[in-house]
Image (cartoon, rainbow, N blue to C red):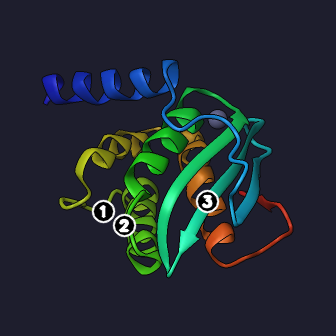
Amino acid sequence: MNDLRELYQDTLLDHYRQPRNAGRMADANRTAEGFNPLCGDKVKLYLKVEDDVIMDARFEGSGCAIATASASLMTEGIKGKRREEALRLLNVIHGMVTAGKNADDIGKLVVLAGVHEFPQRVKCATLAWHTLKAALENIETPVTTE
Ligand code: ZN
Protein backbone atom coordinates (compact mmCIF):
# COMPACT_ATOMS: atom_id res chain seq x y z
CA MET A 1 0.00 0.00 0.00
CA ASN A 2 2.83 2.38 0.78
CA ASP A 3 4.30 1.79 -2.66
CA LEU A 4 0.96 2.57 -4.22
CA ARG A 5 0.67 5.70 -2.17
CA GLU A 6 4.05 6.85 -3.36
CA LEU A 7 3.15 6.11 -6.93
CA TYR A 8 0.01 8.21 -6.58
CA GLN A 9 2.00 11.02 -5.12
CA ASP A 10 4.61 10.83 -7.86
CA THR A 11 1.94 10.99 -10.55
CA LEU A 12 0.22 13.94 -8.89
CA LEU A 13 3.50 15.80 -8.45
CA ASP A 14 4.46 15.09 -12.04
CA HIS A 15 1.18 16.55 -13.30
CA TYR A 16 1.60 19.56 -11.02
CA ARG A 17 5.14 20.27 -12.16
CA GLN A 18 4.44 19.63 -15.81
CA PRO A 19 0.74 20.15 -16.37
CA ARG A 20 -0.55 18.52 -19.54
CA ASN A 21 -2.76 20.58 -21.86
CA ALA A 22 -2.00 23.86 -20.09
CA GLY A 23 -2.74 27.09 -21.91
CA ARG A 24 -5.59 28.66 -23.79
CA MET A 25 -7.26 27.23 -26.85
CA ALA A 26 -8.09 29.67 -29.63
CA ASP A 27 -10.76 27.57 -31.33
CA ALA A 28 -12.56 26.22 -28.27
CA ASN A 29 -16.34 26.02 -28.62
CA ARG A 30 -17.04 25.43 -24.93
CA THR A 31 -15.44 27.26 -22.03
CA ALA A 32 -16.16 27.57 -18.34
CA GLU A 33 -14.50 29.06 -15.32
CA GLY A 34 -14.30 27.69 -11.83
CA PHE A 35 -13.18 29.04 -8.50
CA ASN A 36 -12.51 27.36 -5.17
CA PRO A 37 -12.64 30.13 -2.54
CA LEU A 38 -11.55 27.74 0.18
CA CYS A 39 -8.06 27.49 -1.29
CA GLY A 40 -8.01 30.22 -3.96
CA ASP A 41 -7.78 27.82 -6.89
CA LYS A 42 -8.93 29.17 -10.25
CA VAL A 43 -9.37 27.30 -13.48
CA LYS A 44 -10.56 28.16 -16.95
CA LEU A 45 -11.39 25.20 -19.12
CA TYR A 46 -11.43 25.15 -22.92
CA LEU A 47 -13.08 22.35 -24.86
CA LYS A 48 -13.52 21.59 -28.50
CA VAL A 49 -16.63 19.44 -28.78
CA GLU A 50 -17.71 17.99 -32.12
CA ASP A 51 -20.71 15.69 -32.53
CA ASP A 52 -20.81 15.24 -28.75
CA VAL A 53 -17.19 14.08 -28.62
CA ILE A 54 -14.53 16.03 -26.72
CA MET A 55 -11.92 16.45 -29.43
CA ASP A 56 -9.57 18.63 -27.40
CA ALA A 57 -9.29 20.01 -23.86
CA ARG A 58 -7.00 22.60 -22.36
CA PHE A 59 -6.96 24.62 -19.16
CA GLU A 60 -5.49 27.77 -17.69
CA GLY A 61 -5.42 28.59 -14.06
CA SER A 62 -3.62 29.18 -10.85
CA GLY A 63 -4.04 26.74 -8.08
CA CYS A 64 -2.44 24.45 -5.57
CA ALA A 65 -0.75 21.19 -6.50
CA ILE A 66 -3.91 19.11 -6.20
CA ALA A 67 -6.08 21.50 -8.23
CA THR A 68 -3.49 21.76 -10.98
CA ALA A 69 -2.74 18.03 -11.09
CA SER A 70 -6.45 17.23 -11.15
CA ALA A 71 -7.09 19.62 -14.07
CA SER A 72 -4.10 18.19 -15.93
CA LEU A 73 -5.19 14.58 -15.39
CA MET A 74 -8.75 15.48 -16.31
CA THR A 75 -7.91 17.12 -19.64
CA GLU A 76 -5.82 14.07 -20.48
CA GLY A 77 -8.57 11.69 -19.42
CA ILE A 78 -11.51 13.27 -21.24
CA LYS A 79 -9.97 13.75 -24.68
CA GLY A 80 -11.69 11.58 -27.22
CA LYS A 81 -14.53 10.79 -24.83
CA ARG A 82 -18.18 11.30 -25.59
CA ARG A 83 -20.00 13.86 -23.51
CA GLU A 84 -21.91 11.24 -21.51
CA GLU A 85 -18.74 9.22 -20.87
CA ALA A 86 -17.06 12.34 -19.52
CA LEU A 87 -20.04 13.03 -17.25
CA ARG A 88 -19.98 9.43 -16.02
CA LEU A 89 -16.26 9.78 -15.29
CA LEU A 90 -17.03 12.97 -13.39
CA ASN A 91 -19.57 11.15 -11.19
CA VAL A 92 -17.14 8.31 -10.49
CA ILE A 93 -14.35 10.74 -9.57
CA HIS A 94 -16.71 12.76 -7.41
CA GLY A 95 -17.86 9.65 -5.51
CA MET A 96 -14.30 8.48 -5.10
CA VAL A 97 -12.92 11.78 -3.83
CA THR A 98 -15.85 12.88 -1.65
CA ALA A 99 -17.14 9.55 -0.35
CA GLY A 100 -14.16 7.22 -0.80
CA LYS A 101 -16.09 5.01 -3.22
CA ASN A 102 -14.21 2.39 -5.20
CA ALA A 103 -13.38 3.21 -8.78
CA ASP A 104 -11.57 0.58 -10.78
CA ASP A 105 -12.17 1.45 -14.41
CA ILE A 106 -10.93 5.00 -14.60
CA GLY A 107 -7.28 4.40 -15.52
CA LYS A 108 -4.70 6.82 -14.25
CA LEU A 109 -7.34 9.07 -12.68
CA VAL A 110 -7.44 6.66 -9.76
CA VAL A 111 -4.45 8.59 -8.36
CA LEU A 112 -6.96 11.17 -7.15
CA ALA A 113 -8.41 8.60 -4.71
CA GLY A 114 -5.89 9.55 -2.04
CA VAL A 115 -7.41 13.03 -1.82
CA HIS A 116 -10.34 11.52 0.07
CA GLU A 117 -8.10 11.29 3.12
CA PHE A 118 -7.60 15.06 3.06
CA PRO A 119 -11.08 16.63 3.37
CA GLN A 120 -9.71 20.16 3.06
CA ARG A 121 -8.31 19.21 -0.38
CA VAL A 122 -11.45 17.62 -1.80
CA LYS A 123 -12.66 20.86 -3.38
CA CYS A 124 -9.25 21.42 -4.93
CA ALA A 125 -9.51 18.02 -6.62
CA THR A 126 -13.12 18.43 -7.77
CA LEU A 127 -12.85 22.03 -9.05
CA ALA A 128 -11.78 21.08 -12.59
CA TRP A 129 -14.58 18.51 -12.74
CA HIS A 130 -17.27 20.98 -11.64
CA THR A 131 -15.92 23.28 -14.33
CA LEU A 132 -16.08 20.48 -16.88
CA LYS A 133 -19.73 19.95 -16.08
CA ALA A 134 -20.45 23.65 -16.56
CA ALA A 135 -18.59 23.64 -19.89
CA LEU A 136 -20.48 20.61 -21.15
CA GLU A 137 -23.78 22.09 -20.04
CA ASN A 138 -22.97 25.54 -21.44
CA ILE A 139 -23.32 27.25 -18.09
CA GLU A 140 -21.81 30.70 -18.43
CA THR A 141 -21.69 31.96 -14.87
CA PRO A 142 -18.42 30.97 -13.20
CA VAL A 143 -18.84 27.93 -10.97
CA THR A 144 -17.70 27.93 -7.41
CA THR A 145 -17.13 24.96 -5.17
CA GLU A 146 -18.90 26.71 -2.29
ZN1 ZN B 1 -6.37 24.01 -3.74
- Location of residue 85 (image quadrant): bottom left
Crowdedness near tag 3: few (<14), some (14–19) or many (≥20) residues, C-alpha within 10 Å: many
- Residue 51, labelled with which disc? none
Q: In the image, what residue occupies the spot 30% across and 62% down?
A: 101
Query: What element does badge 1 sit on?
Result: loop
Quarter holding the N terminus is: top left
Amino acid type, label 3:
Leu
User: In the image shown, does 34 or 113 lie closer to the viewer?
Assistant: 34
Q: Is residue 27 visible?
A: yes
> In the rendered image, which residue does mark 2 sit on?
92
Crowdedness near tag 2: few (<14), some (14–19) or many (≥20) residues, C-alpha within 10 Å: some
User: In the image shown, does 25 or 99 lie closer to the viewer?
Assistant: 25
Residue 37, percent from left and from top: 80, 44
Sequence-first disc among 3 and 2:
3
Query: What element does badge 3 sit on?
Result: strand
> In the rendered image, which residue does mark 3 sit on?
47
Amino acid type, label 1:
Lys
- Location of residue 14 (image quadrant): top left
CB under 8 Å between discs 2 and 1:
yes
Quarter holding the C terminus is: bottom right
Sequence-first disc among 3 and 1:
3
> In the rendered image, which residue does mark 1 sit on?
101
Crowdedness near tag 1: few (<14), some (14–19) or many (≥20) residues, C-alpha within 10 Å: some
Residue 96, percent from left and from top: 36, 58
In the displayed structure image, the side of residue 104 where residue 62 appears, left or right: right
Query: What element does badge 2 sit on?
Result: helix
Q: Quadrant of ligand 1?
A: top right
Amino acid type, label 2:
Val
State how far apart marks 2 and 1 are (Cα): 8 Å
